[in-house]
Image: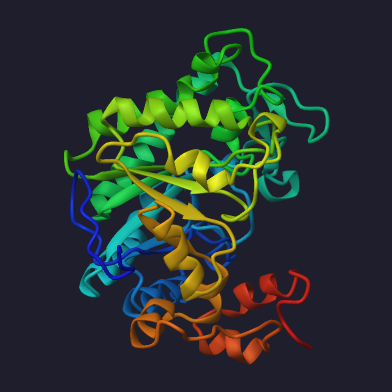
Amino acid sequence: MASLFDSVPLSRGPALPNRFMLSPLTNHQSNVDGTLSDGEHHWLEMRATGGFGLVMTCASHVQRVGQGFPGQLGCFGDQHLAGLTRIADTIRAAGKVSYVQLHHAGNRSPKDLIGEAPVCPSDDAETAARALTHAEVEQLIADFVAAAVRCDKAGFDGVELHGAHGYILCQFLSPEINTRTDEFGGSLENRARVLMRIVDGVREQCRPDLQLAVRLSPERFGMKVDEIREVFSWLVASNKVDLIDMSLWDVFKEAHEPEHAGKQLLELFTSIPRGAVKLAVAGKIATPQDAQKVIDLGADIAAIGRGAILHHDFPNRTKADPNFTPRSLPVTAEVLRSEGLSEPFVNYMKVWAGFVSE
């Protein structure tokens, strides 16, 4: 049986020292201009020393207008390079593998935050987002690649393209949101063109051993399971991606599309041939037993979110006691502070019903 503490070799770059990945978590901790704060650095340092084999930043926006939340870490300019380098150096010093998640919120960028109408593959009346011009799509691709180059220069081991959760790469993939009639809309091949060109650009412009991951999610935002499965297979066939990170909402849920009735959503992705590409999965992996179960079911890496908030040393605790029981909710703000959450992050968690006690 595969162990949570097995080393996980990837086709490029360093092996992961174990199967635990820190999920990229919205946290509101960085400075207004997207530069690194001490609070964000402290959060990531504690998770690296706490045993997460792969430590991933929060979603980091590749364009100013792609910001999705206040206090978001930026990677769209060289003003962010010093902070990014500091994070990469800290994670490396802890003997862990470091990633930045590259992100653009698209029509989910709050207008009052970015100071203008958000952008989207197509005009979107619901969010008042405007359609990107052809030239702006080309610039979007270039800026994702430029951000990857910046993270490469900072010394990160890898980058992840955020193609999930209804953000801009997911918006391009979605037949409900993307109604373009040019080469970036229509067929699935066209709707995936932005993502695949970014993948190509990262491989062309970054160092050969930089690891490249892609996060995908099915079922919401117009995403069909079979289409995401096909994109998954295209990424594997490209031989340019090292890791696919599937955000499944709940890793143990059944697929809700009628054609997949009775099948576990996780199984629909573990069953796809993936060669040397590793599969990470996320979604309500709350306990060490849950983490081991997803590995037993065929995933390579367990992405931990809530558990990483409640215990900065979730992997280390699991290694010491495979039956350790994580804290139950709600917890006090003081507990969260003791686990390395800065005040903006603590305040953000208070928005989540039942997470923080009064």
The residue depicted at 35 percent of the width and 47 percent of the height is 159
Q: Position of residue 209 (x, y in %)?
A: 17, 44
Among the 4 quarters of the image, the one containing residue 125: top right
Q: State left or right for residue 190 relative to residue 132.
A: left
Q: Which of 322 and 35 is in front in this view?
A: 322
Q: Nearer the viewer, residue 258 or 187?
A: 258
Count numbered badges in the picture: 0
Q: Where is residue 230 in the image (x, y as percent from the top left)?
A: 48, 25
Among the 4 quarters of the image, the one containing residue 204: top left
Q: Where is residue 292 in the image (x, y as percent from the top left)?
A: 42, 67
The residue depicted at 67 percent of the width and 44 percent of the height is 109
Give the farthest residue toward the right: 126
Instruction: Check the image and report above or below for 345 versus 259.
Output: below
Q: Is residue 61 visible?
A: no
Colour pattern:
rainbow
Q: State left or right for residue 338 relative to residue 254.
A: left
The residue depicted at 60 percent of the width and 42 percent of the height is 263
Instruction: Check the image and report above or below for 3 versus 197.
Output: below
- Which quadrant holds the N terminus? bottom left
Q: Can residue 153 be seen in this view?
A: yes
Q: State left or right for residue 319 relative to residue 58.
A: left
Instruction: Check the image and report above or below for 91 versus 75.
Output: below
Q: Nearer the viewer, residue 202 or 21?
A: 21
The residue depicted at 30 percent of the width and 63 percent of the height is 2
Among the 4 quarters of the image, the one containing residue 26: bottom right
Q: Position of residue 29 (x, y in %)?
A: 55, 68
- Which quadrant holds the C terminus? bottom right
Instruction: Check the image and report above or below for 53 versus 129.
Output: below
